[in-house]
Image (cartoon, rainbow, N blue to C red):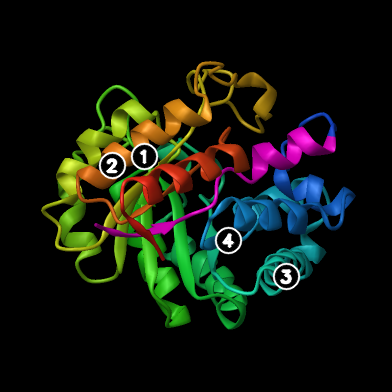
């Protein structure tokens, strides 16, 4: 039996789907602005599905994105709103932890856009300290390079909370970061600043290779994959929208749960879902974990 922390699933894509609105470069932030309470509803559905962690809808709340749309004066208020909607769902559920999401600066999956180290550290520290009073752990997500890992861990350290570092790996070779750098080179970086190491927003098939590398790092580890067919060239341009990405129709809750159970068999103690996974996927993972004799914590 393994004690497994069950993360929630995708937030941004779920919000876009539920809103019925056309996607924008502001992604989940735009939906939260236009549909107050929808983030709370998604968090609540994940808790009901069996998740024990709510990940805040703060992934895309960054100055550079908000400035483009004249919304930077709402930077702190948007973080506060996201925190309040997660806290309300937890209170409604009666238990659970809140993970404060630290998404990539500038763009996802594009390590070449990551700012210089000092600038990135300052920006991550600002967000980490905004989130800290209302969360249990910081979750640095979709980390695409070693430079990104160093900066986000240093910045997040300002909050004085545990930090879970989650990297995005090559969809065809999970032993490498999106930057092409060997995942094994992350070991010295996480040793001094991370409380757990994970892989996220990559193909489920890539996660086994990543977990095999994590197993030698001496930290709790895990994975939460996406359900995209591929990260397209269109999405890797400036100011992309998620309608340039397509979901995998075959990635049913049952198929996804099979991957998650194999990750646990490989030693993962933290699993969940990323983009294009839903409460139904998390519910099936929860059901399968319990049926296999594992304890969800």
Q: Residue at x 76, y 64 (%)?
A: 78
- For the N terminus, the quadrant is bottom left
For disc 3, the marked residue is 92
Whole-number angstrom distance, CA of label 1 to CA of label 2 = 5 Å
Q: Dot 4 corresponds to which residue? A: 54
Q: Is residue 32 visible?
A: yes
Q: Earlier in the sequence, mark 1 or mark 3?
A: 3
Where in the figure is residue 146, as x and y percent of width and height? Answer: 28, 49
- The residue nearer to you, when weighing 175 against 87, is 87
**For the residues bearing labels 3 and 4, Cβ distance under 8 angstroms:** no
- What residue is shown with label 2? 263
Q: Is residue 257 above or below residue 216?
A: above
Whole-percent x and y of residue 54?
Answer: 58, 61
User: Mark number for residue 260?
Assistant: 1
Figure quadrant of residue 269: bottom left
134 left or right, relative to 166: right
Residue 21 place in picture, x, y as percent: 85, 33
Magenta part of the protein: which range? 1-19
Q: Quadrant of residue 88?
A: bottom right
Could you classify mark 3 by the number of other residues whose Cα lies within 10 Å: few (under 14), some (14-19), or many (20 or more)? few
């Amino acid at each position: 039996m393994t004690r497994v922390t069950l993360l929630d699933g995708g937030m941004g894509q779920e919000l876009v789907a539920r809103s019925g609105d056309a996607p924008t470069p502001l992604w989940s932030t735009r939906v939260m602005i236009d549909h107050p309470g929808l983030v709370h509803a998604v968090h609540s559905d994940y808790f009901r599905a069996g998740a024990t962690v709510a990940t805040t809808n703060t992934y895309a709340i960054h100055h550079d994105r908000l400035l483009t749309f004249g919304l930077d004066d709402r930077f702190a208020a948007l973080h506060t709103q996201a925190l309040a909607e997660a806290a309300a769902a937890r209170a409604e559920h009666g238990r659970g932890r809140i993970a404060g999401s630290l998404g990539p600066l500038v763009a996802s999956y594009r390590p070449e856009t990551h700012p210089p180290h000092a600038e990135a550290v300052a920006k991550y520290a600002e967000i980490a300290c905004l989130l800290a009073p209302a969360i249990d752990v910081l979750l640095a997500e979709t980390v695409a390079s070693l430079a990104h890992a160093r900066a986000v861990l240093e910045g997040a350290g300002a909050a004085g909370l545990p930090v879970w570092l989650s990297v995005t790996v090559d969809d065809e070779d999970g032993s490498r970061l999106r930057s092409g750098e060997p995942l094994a080179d992350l070991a010295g970086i996480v040793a001094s600043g991370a409380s757990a190491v994970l892989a996220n927003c990559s193909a489920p098939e890539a996660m086994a290779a990543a977990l095999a590398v994590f197993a030698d790092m001496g930290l709790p580890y895990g994975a939460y994959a996406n359900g995209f067919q591929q990260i397209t060239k269109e999405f890797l341009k400036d100011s992309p929208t998620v309608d340039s990405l397509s979901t995998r129709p075959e990635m049913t809750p049952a198929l996804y749960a099979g991957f998650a159970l194999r990750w646990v068999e490989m030693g993962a103690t933290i699993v969940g879902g990323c983009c294009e996974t839903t409460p139904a996927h998390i519910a099936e993972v929860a059901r399968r974990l319990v049926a296999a004799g594992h304890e969800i914590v």
